[in-house]
Amino acid sequence: MAETKPKSNAPEPPSLSDHVVNIVARAVLGLARALPYRWRVPMVGWFMSRIAAPLVGWSKRVRDNLTYVFPDMPEAEIRRLMRAVPDNAGRTFIEIYSGQDFINRVKDLPLEGPGAEALTAAREAGKPVVLVTGHIGNYDVARAALFAQGFPMGALYRPLGNTLFNERYVEAISTIGSPVFPASRDGIGALMKHMRGGGWLGILIDVYATRGADLTFFGKPAPTAVSAAEWALKFGATVIPVYGLRQDNGLDFRIHLSDPIPPTDPNTMTQALNDDLERIARQHLEQWFWIHRRWKPERQLARAAANIGP
């Protein structure tokens, strides 16, 4: 029998796992932030790569994703990336929670690539911009630098499932730059007002979207939300892919802006964004977050079956 009791909009109470994760994360943050920046970043990268990733299943997920996308990848390269990918993720984690230390490291970075001129032109014209990135390098580098350099940046974020840690997360990303908008009805409404006034939006595109468009990433089915393109078309915004790419010393970055995406239709524009991110990720395989469940083959099979007529 179907449940008839109306569902509450209140968040679920924290689970035991949520409490444990919150305690461990805060402990790691506290210990790491007691160290100088140049030591804390590689330390957390090492911790994530050598200890946390094997324990929480990230190492296996990196392997599974790589063998799904690159079935002929040599075993030595898979093992290298099983270490390098969580290391980059750990560095990104502590950088975002390092506040002013992180901002000072990236705030004066030059804007490189063919999209830099279009970005400057949009600011001079007072035109809204949608900057689209993915989970590669450190995805908050460009936002931190652009905000510090006076660009009218806002950002859309997905609240963490762990409500105990979410408040700390929102505080950290707000320190890098404000405003930030949660992916909720009220948050989207505030974001629309921001863009209507000429404000800019930073958004990540490389997450599995259950109701997303049937697009591809690395040649595999990857349902993707087309919201960024829809909003850009609605407000006449320029859409530019942007990436904060980690340099060989593990601490510094460069900001690359690709060519603006031509305004056509949401699906075509979003596929172009997926393709551009794939192009950059292929050049920096160790920097893309292969720890994500970007592809869900089991759901894709069910989705395909549901779309097949009788």
Image (tube, grey):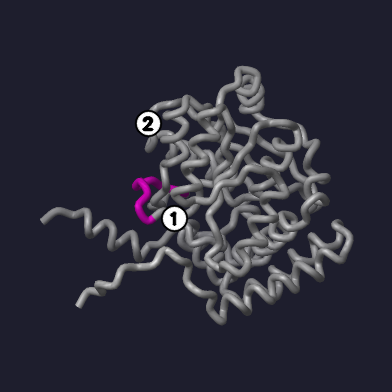
Near-viewer residue (1 or 278): 1
The mark found on residue 268 in the picture is none
Q: Which residues are magenta?
A: 210-217
Please provide percent x and percent y for residue 45. 74, 64
| Left/right of residue 263 with respect to residue 280 in the rendered view | left
Q: Which mark is residue 265?
A: 2
Tag 1 residue: 208
* Residue sitting at x 58%, y 47%: 281
Q: Amino acid at mark 2?
A: Asp
| Prevailing SS of the magenta stretch | loop
User: Residue drawn at (35%, 68%), measured in percent from left and top?
Assistant: 7
Q: Position of residue 36 (x, y in %)?
A: 89, 60
Could you say whether the residue bearing mark 1 is in a helix, strand or loop?
loop
Q: As rendered, which of 127 and 105 lies closer to the eye? A: 127
- Of all residues, the one furthest to the left in this rendering is 310
Q: Amino acid at mark 1?
A: Tyr
Q: Which quadrant of the rendered structure holds the C terminus?
A: bottom left
Residue 49 relative to residue 19: left or right: right
Alpha carbons under labels 2 and 1: distance apart: 20 Å
Q: Which image quarter: residue 16?
A: bottom right
- Residue at position x 37%, y 49% from top? 212
- Residue situated furthest top in the rendering: 125
User: Residue 22's image quarter?
Assistant: bottom right
Check if residue 306 falls in the magenta segment: no
Q: Quadrant of the N terminus?
A: bottom left
Indicate yes or no whether the magenta region holds residue 212: yes
